[in-house]
């Protein structure tokens, strides 16, 4: 019998294709009727608090099917350009779950959450006693969402010495001796082949400096493409089966976590049923 998926849990229509996220000129927030709202107020107004993900101990402001205005909006009706911060992506869920289950990997460390979106991965690191977290995203609205999610999780009084917001595109920066972090966490940023190649090349340099790197991905083709290309195609099949280890000439990835996604997350993410946390050797 044919299974019918209710439209309730299909992804929003505007979330049809992944784009390359190298925004140089991010459009400012504007929406007729709500232009007087600050971005921060709009983040609160347009989302709901959700624990429907792999780290339910962390409440997060997300766009859910209950936020019907944005869930059902067309791309040209969106008040925010590409509000990817308003979802907790499968790869991010995997890294956050891993960090909460294995807090020793971040305890006392200076952590970078690269492409943080709404900041769930970095918030998991703070909850796991990281000394500090830098939330990095090129989208300024994402950093507003991080601020709201920090309040939700830690109240108003989280020590601001432990938190930094960084809107710069860091992956074009050379890695120098005074790299400011001990651990880099990356949640689901490898969804475009060209961009994934750049991010992995940068992370490889980071790892060469002895800095720990953990990245989450649900098995996206862009991630498979890059690892396959790096190994002259030899890894394509093995990667599809999500092995425990991937070794190419320039990259050595070890899978440290495999997580079954919630049923609603599977439907929202077009059938990805698991997400993986990898570390670079
Ligand atoms: C799919 S979302 C993942 C968000 C979050 N890590 C998670 O797992 O829920 C990717 C995020 O990366 C951000 N991004 C894209 N390119 C970036 C770059 N060059 N530097 C920093 N952030 C970037 C996007 O704005 C977006 O918020």
Image (cartoon, grey):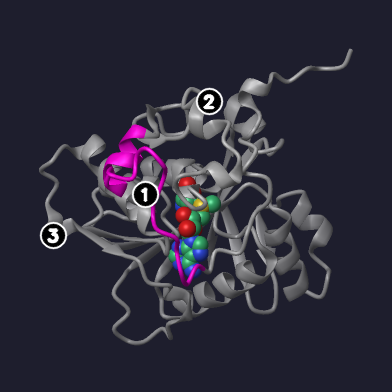
Residue to which mark 1 is pinned: 119
Residue to which mark 3 is pinned: 161
Q: Are marks 1 and 2 in contact (CB under 8 Å)?
A: no
Please tell me whether residue 175 belongs to the stretch shown in magenta.
no
Point out which mark residue 65 bears: 2
Decide: is 151 above or below 169: above
Percent position of residue 249, x then y: 69, 79
Instruction: Give the structural element (helix, strand or loop) at label 1.
Output: loop
The disc, 3 or 2, on the residue closer to the chain's N-terminal end is: 2
Q: Is mark 2 within 8 Å of ligand 1?
A: no
Decide: is 180 above or below 121: below
Q: CA distance from mark 3 to mark 1?
A: 17 Å
The disc, 1 or 2, on the residue closer to the chain's N-terminal end is: 2
- For marks 1 and 2, give the one nearer the viewer: 2
Who is closer to the viewer here, 86 or 37? 37
Q: CA distance from mark 1 to mark 2?
A: 20 Å
Q: Residues within 10 Å of mark 2 (few under 14, many from 20)?
A: some
Kindly tell me whether residue 217 is visible in this rendering.
Answer: yes
Q: Residues within 10 Å of mark 3 (few under 14, many from 20)?
A: few
């Amino acid at each position: 019998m044919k299974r019918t998926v209710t439209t309730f849990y299909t992804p929003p229509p505007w979330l049809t294709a992944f784009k390359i996220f190298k925004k140089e000129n991010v459009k400012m927030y504007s929406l007729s009727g709500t232009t007087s709202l600050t971005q921060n107020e709009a983040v609160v107004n347009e989302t709901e608090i959700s624990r429907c993900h792999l780290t339910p101990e962390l409440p997060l402001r997300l766009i859910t099917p209950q936020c019907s205005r944005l869930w059902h909006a067309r791309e040209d009706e969106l008040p925010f350009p590409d509000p990817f911060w308003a979802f907790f992506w499968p790869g991010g869920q995997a890294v956050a779950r891993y960090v909460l289950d294995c807090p020793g990997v971040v305890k006392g460390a200076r952590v970078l959450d690269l492409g943080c979106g709404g900041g769930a991965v970095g918030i998991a690191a703070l909850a796991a006693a990281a000394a500090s977290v830098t939330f990095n995203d090129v989208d300024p609205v994402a950093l507003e969402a991080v601020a709201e999610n920090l309040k939700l999780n830690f109240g108003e009084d989280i020590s601001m010495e432990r938190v930094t917001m960084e809107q710069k595109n860091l992956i074009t920066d050379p890695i120098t001796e005074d790299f400011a972090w001990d651990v880099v966490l990356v949640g689901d940023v490898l969804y475009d082949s060209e961009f994934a190649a750049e991010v992995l090349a940068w992370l490889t340099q980071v790892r060469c400096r002895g800095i720990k790197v953990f990245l989450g991905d649900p098995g996206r083709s862009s991630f498979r493409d890059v690892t396959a290309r790096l190994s002259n195609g030899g890894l394509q099949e093995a990667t599809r089966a999500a092995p425990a280890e991937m070794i190419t000439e320039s990259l050595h990835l070890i899978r440290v976590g495999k997580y079954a996604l919630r049923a609603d997350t599977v439907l929202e993410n077009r059938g990805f049923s698991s997400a993986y946390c990898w570390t670079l050797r």
